[in-house]
Image: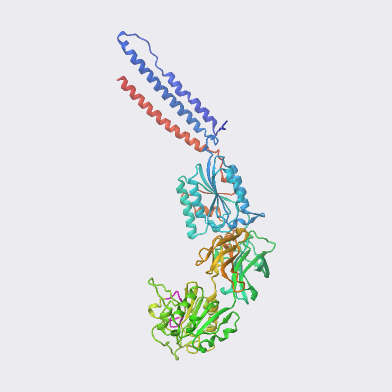
Amino acid sequence: MTLPLLFALAHPGLMWTGLALVSVPILIHLFFRRRHRVVRWAAMEFLLAALRKQKRRMEVENLILLLVRIALIALLGLALARPAVEASSFNAMGVGARAVALVIDTSASMGALLNGRPMLDRARERASKTLLDLPEESRVTLLVSRGDGSGAPQVLVESATPADARARLGGITLAYGPNDLASVFRLAGRKLKTMRGRAMVLFLSDLQRRDWLPGGARHDDLHGALRQLATDEGQSPPVVLLDVNGGDFNNVVVTDLVIDEGLEAFAPSVLGLSAAVVNFGTAPASGRIALFVGRADGGWERKQSVEVKDIVPTLASATAAEFARKEVQFHLPIRKEDEGPLPIKVLFEPDSTGDRLESDNQRFLAIHARPPVRFLPVRNYEGALNVLRDMETIEVIEFEQAIYPNDLSDEDLTGIDVVLWADANIHDLDAEGATKLEKFVRGGGAFLAYLGTEARPDKVNAAFFKEYRDGSFQGLFPFMLADGNNMPIDDENPTHIDIESARGPLFREMAESPGLFYSPDIIGFRALRKDTQDLDAYVKARYVNGEPAVLVHRLGRGLVVAVTTTPDERAIRLNGSILPAAFFFNAAHFLVEQDPRLRNVLVGETIVVSLPPSAKEIIVEQPERAGGTIREPITEPDAPYRLSSTGAPGIYRIAIKSAAASATSGLPSEKRHVAAVNLHPSESDLRRAGASELEQAYRAGGVKLMFSSDVEEALPEATDTTGELARTLLGIVVALLGVELFLAWYFGNRRKAGSA
């Protein structure tokens, strides 16, 4: 087999000069050879044998010195000629062999179009050309910055030939999420340790500003990962960033879709929705925002559309908090037949100016249109509910027949959303009823308790308060009432609820319009024991004298709202204030509201679904880009189901099959949910980090960070070993000079010793 061996000289004349100078030590050797006249002397004949032996040794020594000096001069001339050698086929780890960690950016921003093609296609093409340019004996580990269905980087092929790595490029797809670059470089560093050859990291990316220059702890983590890469490899492998982006970054994105005021959707009602768009382009943009509602067959029904004009561009230096947003309002009628899981989406339809990233033009929202809130009032007398009588005319609230406390233990709470304690007499509640009420709340029910003259402190504390040794409250109430059977009442100097202290959804309108929602005169309220009043986390409103007025406590999957007064003439002078009715209306929504974060998440986050006790199987219909349908048996019905494989934006339809038979058909029941997964809005910001910014950000720590927009620039020619070979030859010359000096000294000392 013929092995190609290419040899080139930068200065060939110097090499020939060096070879000519090789004759100098030869001539000197020949010129100074000793000439002897033979004189025979009989007395010295016995010494001839010893002299012949010494002469042969001296000739060998002189020959060794001659060869060393010839080699020294010849190599010096060759080094000055600066030779370049390509011997990549001479052995498996020749001078052309490389160990390359090739990283492809698969974040959502790589789906942006440039000349009608996504940037990920450009990255694959440039990676293919890079792999073709690598010597065949090189080893390549191919990674993607974000694996499909997860936020972590993923290795596609490890320590493979360039040809094998090139064959895997076609299967790379977008992963619809932001990058964790620190994890990417740590993984690349670990893989480089296992590979032989000249190490380098080649990262093909759009250099999105959010990823590369995020600031704060994320930036520090990335900088630390780059420094660790240089330290681990010892010789600080270069990190080459290959820019696959170009052109402008015009892009309008839908950043938000929310229910107004965070209220639940009721059927029937009119649902207020807000959508927001941000312009990341360089010029004002226009278009339409359309509202769609999901159909049972999985399709979408267009409901409304609004024209938006002159969406202001975001400044190049703006941060996420400073983006210029344009909001649009929708009012969506929810019919009785819409009750149940309801997917919603808005879609931005740009005008003729176009849009580079289409995956962020829509945003999804998953809601559950629920029936009216069912209240079970527990009371002692008719007047306790007089102030709430008008609430019965509101369609989203239904009152069951009121009961007395001693009837609670026998009451069926199935289908009840809220137990309303309307200043009821606590001593009529037996232990079984108290246990049943606590179990109801822990299972997801709600308890709205108005305390009043009938709330005896000793009975309330015994039935509703439990404190464990670690200081946590485990009962229905996270407080104890102060001693005494009567509420502190002062008809002459009533107190009021301090509206400025009110916070949260229970007092939504009060903070916005304090002049309208003024507090009525409070002539009586229940005081809390001082030793259990360190309750800032629970108190949502106070009286002007600082005493707690409204407290909220989450217990298990349910909620408790306690009001230390009662909404009737025994404690409140109803002098025209509508605060009690507004508070009650807000409480009705708040107590049944499900945390929207459980069913509305970002790509890569986890969807959490509560399971009924009899759940046996769960079926998840994912968007096609996320991987299709999932069927899983339920092995832990007491724990919520968690779906972490949210790899693509869209609507996820979830069906929970239960072993319990339905009342109508007798067949196993099925409960349906919908969840919405959206792209992180920051992925729509296509602004790039410049080379000067990156160099300044990562200059410290010994990191060799290089930038390129071309493959040839990113990969210097493997045959360009001129500098390396010349330095090697000069090193050999210095070593030979040392050897020559040592041998000359050593041989000279031996001769002196012999002549003596």
Residue 542 shown in magenta: yes
Q: Residue 323: where, in percent of width, then height?
A: 57, 65
Does 35 appear above or below 343?
Answer: above
Does 368 appear above or below 35?
Answer: below
The colour scheme used to paint the residues is rainbow
Closer to the camera in the image, 594 or 680 = 594
Does 633 appear above or below 521?
Answer: above
- Observer able to see residue 513: no
The furthest residue to the right: 352
Figure quadrant of residue 717: top right
Looking at the rendering, the stretch of residues picked out in magenta corresponds to 535-548
Residue 738 shown in magenta: no
- Observer able to see residue 163: yes
Q: Residue 663: where, in percent of width, then height?
A: 59, 74
Q: Residue 462: where, in percent of width, then height?
A: 40, 80
Residue lying at 38% horizontally and 78% vertically, measured from the top left: 531
Q: Residue 593: where, in percent of width, then height?
A: 54, 74
Closer to the camera in the image, 67 or 604 = 604
The furthest residue to the bottom: 492
Closer to the camera in the image, 414 or 488 = 414
The furthest residue to the front: 666
Q: Quadrant of the C terminus?
A: top left
**For the image shown, how many numbered marks are present on the structure?**
0
Q: Quadrant of the N terminus?
A: top right
Residue lying at 49% horizontally and 81% vertically, measured from the top left: 408
